[in-house]
Image: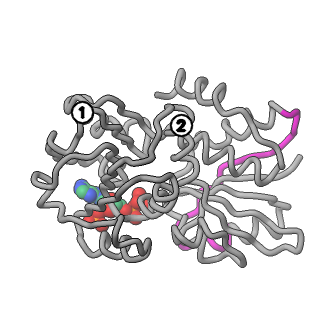
């Protein structure tokens, strides 16, 4: 069977093997899809070994390796270049490695198609300006939001992301300390790693417009705190990133196998068992 893998550290609890196997079953494709745990210092060699000596065709990449995956590639798509990170590596016919990023497209499709929310015209607030935020910011802009306000605990990273997007009329930054006074938003995205780190965010309810969508890029335990805040704030929609996980995987699957999998049954299976 064709060889695929997901690299991360830690990686044991990754849902990616299950997702890709479920997609493959839809088409009767046989594949090997395993988890490879690599510490940061060993990541580049592990990737090289997988592609050169284990007949690897494609790899997903998750924390903390997405920037390193981007850096080691020979070719990079625009989505990966914007984000400065890659969650998909593909071996090209000539043996070179191509980097792509499907996180942003996956998030937007989860919101607009699965949850049927039209993002056009939304005033969006992005909490965080690290790798996860960079991975989705351009896709949000492309989805037609009216404005993007980036707030990060360390303001330099927010400014750097706003500069990189380069649309000063649509993208603004504010200070974390000013969250109490910056008004309300239709879309609030939690792109911080606070939940993953077991830390809580203290956010004012005034951020949430009455019909707002609150979206956490994570799922499971890491999203619980932010979504609880969103429900307490009385927002209309509060969603975690489980659907985004399935959608970003579908884009990788299509890139590798040339076939578009159905994501809804896989999403429902994971929702029933995981979150
Ligand atoms: P990831 O790839 O998950 O985005 P990252 O690139 O390390 O990881 O970025 C983590 C983000 O979460 C950053 O925006 C970070 O803010 P700083 O740049 O100020 O460090 C943010 N973050 C992490 N813990 C946080 C907390 N307790 N409160 C607020 N922001 C937090």
Please tell me whether residue 251 is drawn above or below residue 266 in the rendered image.
below
Q: Count residues near mark 2 (Cα–Cα under 10 Å), then give few for <14, some for 14-19, many for 20+.
A: many
Region rendered in magenta: 27-46
In the image: residue 17, left or right of residue 158: right
Q: Which of 140 and 270 is in front in this view?
A: 140
Q: Nearer the viewer, residue 36 or 245?
A: 245
Ligand 1 falls in which quarter? bottom left
Which disc is residue 210 wearing? Answer: 1
Q: Nearer the viewer, residue 119 or 4?
A: 119
x 22%, y 64%: residue: 153
In the image: residue 259, left or right of residue 176: right
Inspect the magenta stretch and tell me whether residue 120 lies in it. no
Q: Is mark 2 on a helix, strand or loop?
A: helix
Residue occupied by mark 2 = 243
Coordinates of residue 167 in the picture (x, y in percent): 40, 71
Inspect the magenta stretch and tell me whether residue 43 lies in it. yes
Which numbered disc, 2 or 1, marks the residue that appears first in the sequence? 1
Please tell me whether residue 180 is drawn above or below residue 169 in the rendered image.
above
Q: Which image quadrant for residue 89? A: bottom right
CB of mark 1 near ligand 1 (< 8 Å): no
């Amino acid at each position: 069977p064709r060889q695929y893998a997901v690299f991360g550290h830690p990686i044991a609890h990754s849902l990616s093997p299950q997702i890709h196997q479920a997609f493959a079953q839809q088409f009767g494709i046989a594949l090997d899809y395993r988890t490879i745990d690599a510490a940061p210092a060993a990541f580049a060699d592990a990737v090289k070994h997988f592609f050169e000596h284990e007949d690897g065709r494609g790899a997903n990449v998750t924390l903390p390796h997405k920037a390193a995956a981007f850096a080691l590639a020979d070719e990079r798509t625009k989505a990966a270049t914007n984000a400065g990170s890659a969650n998909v590596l593909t071996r090209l016919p000539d043996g070179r490695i191509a980097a792509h990023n499907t996180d942003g497209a996956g998030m937007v499709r989860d919101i607009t198609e699965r949850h049927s929310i039209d993002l056009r015209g939304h005033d969006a607030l992005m909490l965080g300006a690290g790798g996860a935020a960079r991975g989705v910011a351009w896709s949000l802009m492309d989805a037609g939001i009216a404005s993007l306000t980036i707030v990060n605990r360390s303001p330099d990273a927010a400014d750097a992301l706003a500069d990189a997007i380069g649309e000063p009329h649509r993208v603004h930054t504010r200070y974390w300390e000013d969250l109490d006074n910056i008004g309300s938003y239709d879309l609030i995205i939690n792109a911080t790693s606070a939940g993953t780190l077991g830390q809580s965010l203290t956010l004012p309810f005034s951020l949430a417009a009455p019909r707002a969508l609150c979206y956490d890029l994570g799922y499971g335990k890491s999203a619980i705190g932010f979504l609880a805040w969103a429900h307490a704030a009385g927002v209309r929609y509060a969603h975690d990133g489980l659907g985004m996980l399935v959608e970003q995987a579908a884009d990788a699957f299509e890139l590798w196998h040339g076939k578009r999998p159905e994501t809804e049954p896989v999403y429902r299976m994971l929702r029933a068992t995981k979150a």
